[in-house]
Image (cartoon, rainbow, N blue to C red):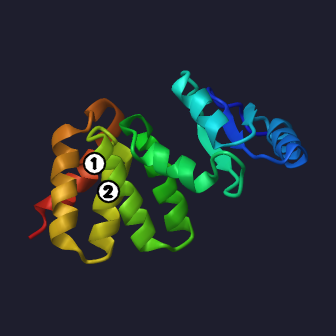
C-alpha cells in the first residue's frame, strides 16, 4: 500500500458517482483525497488555504470547467509548482514541447521552482538546445539550496564545465 501523503489529492469532478469512485480508489491506495464539484469550488478550496499534492480534474463541468480553472491557476504565482508536475506528466507522455512550456512557466511564476529549473536544464541539454540549457543550469547552480539539491548541483556543474 502507498504511504499517505502529507497533503491530500484534490478531485474536481461534477459527477458525484465518479467523484466518489475516485476518492475511494485513492483511499484504498493509501491516499487522502478532498473532493469538490467544479472549478468554482476548487478555487474556493485553494484560495482558502488548501494545498493539495496533486489535482485530478474533469474538464467538462458546470459553472467553471477544467480549462477555466487551469487558466485561473496559471495566472496565479502561488501555483507554480503545479506547472512542475504538469511538465513531468507531459514528458511521460512524450510531449517534449509541452513539458518545456510547463517547466518554463513554473520558473517564470516562481524562480525558486528548482525542480522545474533542473528538468529544463537537463531536457534542453538532451535535446541539443545548449544555450537555453546552459542558462537554466547556471541559474540552478547559482540559486538552488545545496542541502537539498547537492547532487543535482554537482551534475549541472559538470555539464557547465564541458566546452
Secondary structure beneath dot 1 equals: helix
Which residue is at the front of the view, 56 or 89?
56
Q: Determine the residue located farthest toward the front in the rendered image.
A: 63
- Image point (32%, 62%), residue name: 122
Mark number, residue 72: none
- Image point (32%, 73%), residue name: 126
Eyeballing the image, is 127 above or below 54? below
Eyeballing the image, is 61 above or below 78? below
- The crowd level at tag 2 (other Cα within 10 Å; few <14, some 14-19, many 20+) is many
> Quarter-wise, where is residue 34 in the image?
top right
> Quarter-wise, where is residue 38 in the image?
top right
Which residue is at the front of the view, 72 or 108?
72
Secondary structure beneath dot 2 equals: helix
x%, y% of residue 45? 61, 28
Which residue is at the front of the view, 147 or 70?
70
Asked if the residue under mark 2 is in contact with the one under mark 1, i.e. CB atoms within 8 Å, the reply is yes
Image position of 89 (left or right of 19): left
Look at mark 1 in the image and give the residue it sits on: 108
Look at mark 2 in the image and give the residue it sits on: 104
Q: CA distance from mark 1 to mark 2?
A: 6 Å
The C terminus lies in which quarter of the figure?
bottom left
Amino acid at each position: 500500500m502507498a504511504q499517505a501523503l502529507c497533503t491530500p489529492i484534490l478531485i474536481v469532478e461534477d459527477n458525484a458517482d465518479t467523484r466518489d469512485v475516485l476518492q475511494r480508489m485513492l483511499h484504498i491506495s493509501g491516499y487522502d483525497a478532498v473532493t469538490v464539484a467544479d472549478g468554482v469550488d476548487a478555487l474556493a478550496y485553494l484560495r482558502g488555504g488548501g494545498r493539495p499534492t496533486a489535482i485530478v480534474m474533469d474538464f467538462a463541468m458546470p459553472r467553471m470547467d477544467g480549462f477555466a480553472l487551469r487558466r485561473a491557476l496559471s495566472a496565479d504565482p502561488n501555483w507554480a509548482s503545479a506547472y512542475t508536475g504538469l511538465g513531468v506528466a507531459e514528458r511521460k507522455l512524450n510531449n517534449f514541447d509541452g513539458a518545456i512550456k510547463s517547466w518554463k512557466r513554473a520558473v517564470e511564476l516562481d524562480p525558486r521552482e528548482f525542480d522545474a529549473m533542473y528538468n529544463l536544464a537537463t531536457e534542453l541539454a538532451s535535446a541539443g538546445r545548449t544555450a537555453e540549457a546552459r542558462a537554466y543550469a547556471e541559474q540552478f547552480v547559482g540559486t538552488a539550496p545545496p542541502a537539498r539539491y547537492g547532487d543535482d548541483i554537482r551534475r549541472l556543474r559538470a555539464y557547465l564545465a564541458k566546452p
